[in-house]
Amino acid sequence: MVTRDTRWPAGTPCWVELSVPDVPKAAAFYQALFGWDVRSAIPSPDGYAIAHLRDRIVAAISPVTSPQDVPASWMTYLAADEADPVAEKITAAGGQLTVGPLDVGEEGRMAVAVDPAGVAFGLWQGGRTTGIGLANEAGALTWNEHLSWEFDASKAFYRAVFGYGFQDVSEGSFRYAVLQVDAREVGGIGQWPDGTPPGTPAAWSVYFAVADTDAAVTAVTGLGGSVIAPVRDSPYGRMGVVADNQGAVFCLISSPEVVRL
């Protein structure tokens, strides 16, 4: 378990946000699955809500504000000491800014960007809200990874923007590296593995810790969600890929060891 009340180190996944058509429906789903206490952000005229676990922030839920055909999805935000210089690095490295940088009241400063592989991600410069306050506990975030068809190019982009170190664990056709900040593991970056359907878009995936992956996957389907990839054992724990009852994809993993900062 990790608790935090100060800013996360720059480059660390520090915030995850779910965008859905129906915020109350999502709140009920994740409350039943993870035990989250979902509270409306005040003032928030658009239904934006903050999820808590043991009275600590673990995620946000936002109404979809873009065209209605945009699917529900989870977005990863990466910590920035100062959002504006990092935003400049994003464009210099071939990414595009779609939102900001802009202030979110006294909570912090944010931006949303798209990397050269086409993946949207956020920047968060913590203010009064420094990011998630709980990780590596059942019901909380435990890992984030970027998967694409362009492993080398994606590594080069994120190194240029965030200065990551990489611990390459590739083997054979499996290509993957652990993202490091000050020699600490903060996430992963890899290439879609063999067998992935052609045309699968690149993505930042979010992993939530659970005590029992099989039981959690069963709970997801019972709540109206679906299974994207069957439960399997991995070197880091038993994992499954699922979608919630509005189609947002996320991963579940149970492990006896901490796999994140």
Image (cartoon, rainbow, N blue to C red):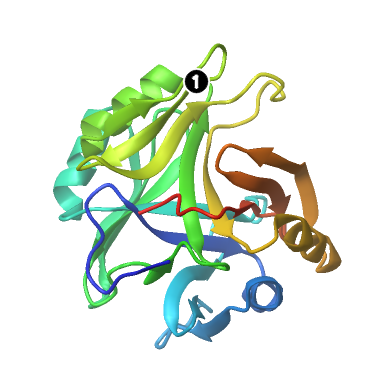
Residue 260 in sight from this viewpoint: yes
Query: Is 19 left or right of 187, judged from the image as shown?
Result: right
Number of numbered tags placed on the structure image: 1
Query: Is 145 left or right of 98, judged from the image as shown?
Result: right
Question: Vertically, is 172 above or below 232?
Answer: above
Q: SS class of the residue under badge 1? A: loop
Q: Residue at x 55, y 81 (%)?
A: 38
Quadrant in the rendering for residue 94: top left
Question: Vertically, is 179 above or below 141?
Answer: above
Give the residue type that dot 1 points to.
Arg
In the rendered image, residue 214, in percent from the top left (x then y), is placed at: 77, 56
Quadrant in the rendering for residue 256: bottom right
The furthest residue to the bottom? 42
In the rendered image, residue 194, in percent from the top left (x then y), is placed at: 66, 19
Q: Nearer the viewer, residue 219 or 210?
A: 210
In the rendered image, residue 233, in percent from the top left (x then y), is placed at: 68, 40
Mark 1 lies on residue: 175
Q: Nearer the viewer, residue 115 or 10?
A: 10
Quadrant in the rendering for residue 173: top right
Label 1 crowd (10 A; few <14 / some 14-19 / many >=20): some
Q: Nearer the viewer, residue 190 or 62?
A: 190
Query: Is 35 left or right of 159, judged from the image as shown?
Result: right
The furthest residue to the front? 256
Quarter containing the C terminus: bottom left
Q: Residue at x 20, y 36 (%)?
A: 89
Q: Residue at x 41, y 47 (%)?
A: 121
Residue 94 in sight from this viewpoint: no
Quarter containing the N terminus: bottom left
In the rendered image, residue 239, in percent from the top left (x then y), is placed at: 66, 47
Q: Residue at x 53, y 79 (%)?
A: 47
